[in-house]
Amino acid sequence: MQKYKIAVIPGDGIGPEVMRESVKVLEHVAGADGSFAFDFTWFPWGCEYYLKNGEMMPADGMDILSGFDAILLGAVGFPGVPDHISLRDLLLRIRHDFDEYINLRPVKLLQGASCPLAGVRPGDVDMLFVRENSEGEYSGQGAWLYKDTPQEVVIQDSVFSRKGTERVIRYAYELARKEKKTLTSISKGNALNYSMVFWDQIFAEVGRDYPDVETHSLLVDAASMFMVKDPKRFQIVVTSNLFGDILTDLGAAIAGGMGLAAGANLNPERKYPSMFEPIHGSAPDIAGKGTANPLAAIWSASQLLDFFGYEDWGARIIQAIEKLLISKEALTPDQGGAATTEECTAALLRYIR
Ligand code: NAD
Ligand code: IPM
Ligand code: MN
């Protein structure tokens, strides 16, 4: 039997509440299949840990994680610890140091999910974002000069390497070719005269190897407008770290909300563990109430199954989520229901069976 060692970092706020549910679903799937099993190890890292220990994870945290096949993460960040510390030292550190340079974020409106756009039906919103996840605007480089003086200057550098830009764009082309879909690159070369001019150049260069793939190039401002006015035009999308962050929250808004938005942080070479997480945060406004929607975390668990080659199970989970949404049974308040987090999962498990 194939065994997978999974590190679970529930994190903060609703992170632990949704993580428990996603683990339940993976345990259920492994039990039903019988050919593979998961061995989960839970790590109490996050903001509470920071307040006790002065660090988000122990000094050898990354070494510990490197021994796992994958990581499941809930959410990180909570009032009381500055976000730039909690996120940089845990979530962003893992993405960067494990070279998880692909962030795959489906923006897919399932039947039964609510969409705020008039006249838009499920088939009209079916995108897959390939977000650069290791550099760009998130390089963490810069300077804070003359701090606390009237001359104060801050510099936040974006870093776009040829290697980093090429590999994410090539990944997106490969995906578009494999799935016979169009590929849209989103950038901002009219204002960002180094980074995004370079991005566009690489998009065109790599594209010469994929004459069979239909491509489009959009400026990020126009792309935001088209995502609302005409979401059908997007299939596979490739974009930079920050643009991908912002556009996928917009994507979540048109595809059922934050409670349904999932993401996979992949190291495609499998040299390091990949990490699967809902794209929402710790939701301090609803934390502790037991009403967080677990479906985003569960959707990310389906991405883990896909990554290990169990695409049938991955698809079955998405189908079960869709059936649950159509039934309107046991949905959490963000989906217009009155169910608790646990009741939602329990109902979902019946649809997976
Ligand atoms: P958020 O995603 O936590 O919440 C935004 C809104 O969406 C809130 O109203 C929240 O209640 C709702 N929401 C989010 N997930 C939900 C779910 N599963 N079910 C029902 N409703 C849900 O974003 P925020 O408020 O901007 O950030 C809160 C904290 O989380 C901050 O510290 C932020 O830095 C951090 N954050 C972490 C991650 C991550 O760990 N991946 C992602 C985004 C934000
Ligand atoms: C996300 C989050 C993170 C990001 C934050 C919490 C650093 O918003 O995963 O979308 O910006 O990548
Ligand atoms: Mn985000």
Image: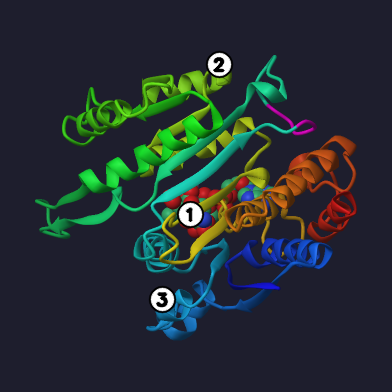
Mark 1: which amino acid?
A: Asn
Is residue 218 part of the magenta span, yes or no?
no
Numbered circle sitting on residue 62: 3
What residue is drawn where x is 44% and y is 54%? 268
Amino acid, disc 3: Met
The crowd level at tag 2 (other Cα within 10 Å; few <14, some 14-19, many 20+) is some
Q: Residue at x 57, y 54 (%)?
A: 307
Main structural element of the magenta stretch: helix, strand or loop?
loop
Label 3 secondary element = helix
Mark nearer the N terminus (1 vs 3): 3
Q: State the SS at label 2.
A: loop
Q: Amino acid at mark 2?
A: Asp
Figure check: 75 above or below 280: below
Under circle 1, the secondary element is strand
Q: Nearer the viewer, residue 203 or 212?
A: 212
Residue 230 is marked as 2
- Residue 189: give x, y in percent of width and height: 24, 26
**Residue range corresponding to the magenta coloring:** 111-115
Q: Which mark is drawn over residue 265? A: 1
